[in-house]
Every structure is written in structure tokens, then in C-alpha cells.
Amino acid sequence: MEEKLAARLAVEALRNGVPNREAVRALGCNQPKAETRFIGMLDEAAGDDSPSASHRGMLVSGDFGTGKSHLLAHLEHLALSRNFVCSRVAISKETPLYDLGKVFTSAMENGRIPGRRGRFIEELALSMQPDSDEYSAFSRWADTAASNGLLNMIFPASRVVHERSGDLDLISEIESFWAGDRIQITKIRNGLKQIDQLQFYKFRAPKAAELSPQRLRFAVELIKSVGYRGWVVLLDEVELIGSYSILQRGRSYAEIARWMGFAHGENYPGLIVVGAVTEDFASAIISADGQRKDCDYVRPRLEQSMRYISLGARAERGMRILERNCLALQPPSDEDVKSTVATLRGLYEKAYDWVPPPYEATAGGAGFQGRMRYKVRAAINEWDLRRLHPGYQPITEFENIATSYEENADLERGTEDDTA
């Protein structure tokens, strides 16, 4: 019964074009270049835990329906199997790429830990072992970073309160603060007073612009301190930034540079980031021949604003990364298509206790008909109709969905505040 349910869930997900874990596990992935590079990034991160180690990033590109989300789901499975924690974040109106605080909070909310199912931050906190060498090293790192001005003292202060306080409500609030929520400074100070540590931790509320990157670094170190090799963050639908205003696009390009490891002065050893973007994004939005010509206009526009003047060079690096460093997804071969359809046929039989007829499919096709998503959904659609209406010979018609990069007024009304 469990196998039938898993097969049904996989088929339903593929029918809707949103592959779930069961579908990805059954179908695998036909992007060997991306998979090989990603595994190399995992191996490097796991083998290099020195303070000078750098975090790693990769961008993949492909048209709508070519398997970007499927690839990210597959990479998530690989990361979890190698003892990394993993978060998948879909860029959206609620999670705009230009707002690190919101992306970080979404990553914490959607985090997965190998072999655990509870709330991400709570599971990490439950894994903390104050007597372990790893935790001791984490404590020393936090204290040293705060003493050197790289981390607000609220982080080591909240850590020591979390470790020693018996106030369960305060402990829960501290965990939520680590995950992106607000916390009253007086609560941490009162916690320090209760454990007789107030005199050792003097701090003010951190500035909003500094809080999110410090949270990110603290979270990565916390993850490593409880025995995991690092944190993999998968960013889907990066192309949504094409719908932002020019300032928001500029800030988003600066965030691309940060996530990909090209932001001077910022580094998060143990963090691995993979972003997925549409194939034509750079040519349509960044190129001098594109719709927006961001390569000409974004940096000057940022540098006209006193608030964002420092982001100009970083945004330019982000644009160059999107133009030059994207790994294009490979189109499926005949062998890939036949293998996928054969596996899908077995899933369908298991899901519905009905033997579907063979479905002939080969690689290629005009436009969107060459995409794997089209071939998968066409097969499922035909089997559905023939199962429900024996003797019926269906003819399937599909409509192409093109990515729109029109500026969206609703997105532009999003918050400009980076506080958590």
C-alpha cells in the first residue's frame, strides 16, 4: 500500500509539472555535468574546514519545462545523502531575492536535515552538545568573531543563554531569533543576568543591514558544530528578478554575487548555493541588446542612491556571473527519453493497478515539444484518458508558456526593509 501511495504521489506531481521526492527518486536526473560539478562542491566543502575556506556557488540555466526544478530536487537528495542539511527556496513576491533577510528566513523554514522531520532550527538546537569539541570550537568562533567586530555580541550572548538558561520560553525565542525572527534585547540581557553572565556581554541592537549576513554566517557555523558537513541552499526561479524595478534588480544582482561567493569581504565556509534561472534571462535583461539593458543602467542607478551606492560594483559582478557562469542544462537524448518513459510507465501501473500501453517518445521536437516535461505530461495525459475511457484514442494539444520579464507593480511595492 505504501509503494502504491508513493507511486500515485509521484505520478500526480509529474502530471502537475512539480516533481516531488518520490518522482525524483524514481526518475533520477539526466544532467551529468551539473551533478558532477555539484558533487565536487560537496566534496570540497566537506574536506576544507579551515577558517580561510570559501563557500561555493553554481548557476544552472534552461528554458521553462527543461527540468530545472527537477534538478534542484535531485541535488537536494544528493546533499542529504552526504550529511549536508539542505533548503530549497523559491524566489517569489513573498521571498524577493534582493532581501537577504526574507531569503534567509525562507531557507530556515524550508530546511531539511538528514533523518529528521522536525522544525529545522529546533532540530539543530536539539543536536547541540555543549560538551563536544565541535560545540566548543563553535563557541570560541562566535566569541572571537564578536570581539573582532565581525559578529554582533548578541549572537554569542544568545548562545550562552540558550546553553545555560532553564527558561524554555526564552530558549524558544532565541532559536526563532537565530532563524530570522525579532527578539527584544532586554530578554537576552535578563537571561544573561539570570545566569550571572551579564558583565561579560555588552552589546546594542545590531543594525538591520548587518543582521542578515551575520545570521547567515552564524547559522552555517551552528550547522557544522552539530555534526553536519555544511548547508546547501537551492534557489529556484531566479528569473523573477526580471520583473523587479531597476533598483530591486540591482540589489538582486548584488545578492547573486553574495550567494555565489563573489562578494568582497563576505564568506560563509560550509555554504553551497545552486541557483536556477531561465536560459534567456541574461540576453533579455542584462545584455546591451536586451529589453532592459541592465549592463548599462543598473550600476549608475544604484550609485545615484546614497543608500545603495556601495552595491554598484557587487551588482556588476552579479550580472557578469549570470551572463558568463551559468551551466546550461543538456537537452534529453533518445536514451534519456525512452528510459524516463519506461520508468514512468512502471510507476503508473503501480499507482493505478492498470497496465498502460507502450508510449513512443523520442528526443527532439519543435520548440517546447522537445522538453522532457512535455513528453512526461503527454504520456500521463494519454494513459489517463485511455484508462478512464477504454477504446478512446486521445489527441493531446499543449500550449507553450513563455517567461515574461515585464515589470510587476505588485512586486515593486514589496518592502525595502532588510530587518528580520
Image: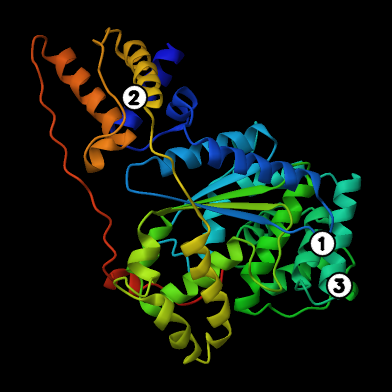
Mark carried by residue 52: 1
Residue 390: where, in percent of width, then height?
11, 9
- Residue 274 in the image: state x and y as whole percent: 55, 51
Q: Amino acid at mark 2?
A: Val
- Measure the C-alpha gap from mark 1 to mark 3: 32 Å
Q: Is residue 376 above or below residue 295?
A: above
Horizontally, is 297 left or right of 359 in the view? right
| Residue drawn at point x = 66 percent, y = 48 percent | 231
Seen in the image, is 307 located left or right of residue 64? right
Q: Residues within 10 Å of mark 3 (few under 14, many from 20)?
A: some
At mark 2, the secondary structure is helix
Of callouts 1 and 2, the N-terminal one: 2
Q: Which residue is mark 2?
A: 11
What kind of residue is marked 1? Ser
Quadrant location of residue 127? top right
Q: Nearer the viewer, mark 1 or mark 2?
A: 1
| N-term mark: 1 or 3 | 1
Quick one: label 2 or label 3, which is nearer the N terminus? 2
Task: Measure how far apart labels 2 and 3 are at the Cα level.
Answer: 57 Å
Percent coordinates x, y for residue 261 in the rendering: 64, 62
Disc 3 designates what residue? 198
